[in-house]
Image (cartoon, rainbow, N blue to C red):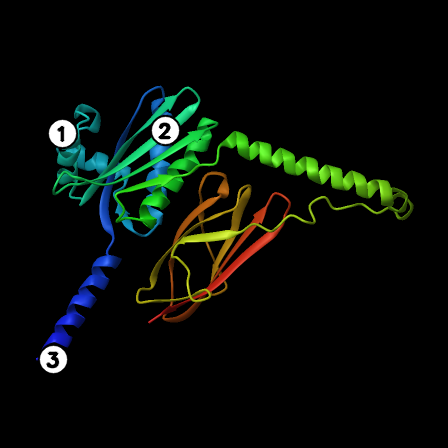
Amino acid sequence: MKIFKLFLSLILAISLLFSQDKKINVAVLKFDAKGFEPAQIDVLVSRFRVALNSTGKFNVLEREKIKEILMEQNLQQSEIAEGVGDNVQIGKILGVREIITGDIGKVEELYTVNVRRISVETSEIVQTASADYEGKISGLLKVMEQLAYKLAENPSEKHVALKVEQEGKQEQGKKQKVEEVVDEETEEEDIFGDLYKEFNIAKDPFKDIDPPKIELYYPSMKNNGYLRVSNRDFELGGIVTDESGIISIKVNGEAADVKLGLAGMNFYKKIKLKKGRNTVEIVATDLYHNVGKLTFTVEVK
């Protein structure tokens, strides 16, 4: 009897483990937005779709595939009402487990973004996410991206809110920092100015700038950069710090082509591993040619 209970417990534990690792099939549908150009909405939703897929928690149906399936059914998203029930009907036609939709609005200078995950089976809202942002419209690209990561980080939470630092405050902070640096340099020139002139010393204004940082959001790296997987097909995605870009990705010393996102900050790549241990190296550079490097090992069982 004890053996049977132990066996049953093991089955339940394994089932739970596999259910947690299984990706959710979703379709990202149109977002309701007023006061925006259609092209702007397409770009913002596309950024959200790509970021969500790259988290590794969701299988996101491609936009072109959605169009193809709807055309086969003689339907278009624009021809169907915007109610939740109709979106769910689209989800059933597309054969996905969940649909994701939302809205983007503007109140004076404040942009608001709301995202909803909806179960196709029950028509219930599974999860919501929201963000408020004040700044240039191009800054919404990063907001959409971060909302996707937020959903993937906490898929079981009913509501997640994204705290976005206002662009004006960021610029003010940067300006204050620059002023402080200028003050320090002015003070240094007052003390060592003659020495700089005498020995023709050119100060490097970028010597204290940190190299770009590379952060992986898929996979989430643990155990000091060592990962064990069972499949040779490996998905790699991440982001580098502002004003930086990936210049190379190498697998076992061989370069792998990588498709860069907007401004080269966001990257996503499918790579083929060999059996046994594989070394993956990602190199990024910033505007001042400072180089950042991330190296980790992936073992294929």
Residue at x 45%, y 30% (from the top left corner): 138
Question: What percent of the width, then of the height, locates residue 135?
Answer: 48, 28
Number of the label disc, if any, that sits on residue 112: 2
- In the depicted view, which residue is nearer to us: 124 or 299? 124
Q: Are marks 3 and 2 in contact (CB under 8 Å)?
A: no
The residues bearing labels 2 and 1 have C-alpha atoms spaced at a distance of 33 Å
Residue at x 69%, y 45% (from the top left corner): 206
Is 260 left or right of 127, judged from the image as shown?
right
Is 132 left or right of 254, judged from the image as shown?
left
Nearest to viewer (mark 3 / mark 1): 3
Question: What percent of the width, then of the height, locates residue 170?
Answer: 54, 35
Question: Mark 3 vs mark 2: which is more N-terminal?
Answer: 3
* Position of 233 relative to 8 (above/below): above
Determine the secondary structure under disc 2: strand
Q: Amino acid at mark 1?
A: Asn
- In the depicted view, which residue is nearer to us: 70 or 56? 56
Question: Can you say which quadrant of the picture contains the N terminus?
Answer: bottom left
Number of the label disc, if any, that sits on residue 74: 1
Q: Residues within 10 Å of mark 1 (few under 14, many from 20)?
A: few
Give the residue pinned by disc 3. Answer: 2
* Position of 300 relative to 139 (above/below): below
Q: Are marks 2 and 1 in contact (CB under 8 Å)?
A: no
- In the depicted view, which residue is nearer to us: 253 or 141? 141
Number of the label disc, if any, that sits on residue 200: none
The residues bearing labels 3 and 1 have C-alpha atoms spaced at a distance of 58 Å
Determine the secondary structure under disc 1: loop
Is 20 left or right of 113, judged from the image as shown?
left
Q: Residues within 10 Å of mark 3 (few under 14, many from 20)?
A: few
Nearest to viewer (mark 3 / mark 2): 3
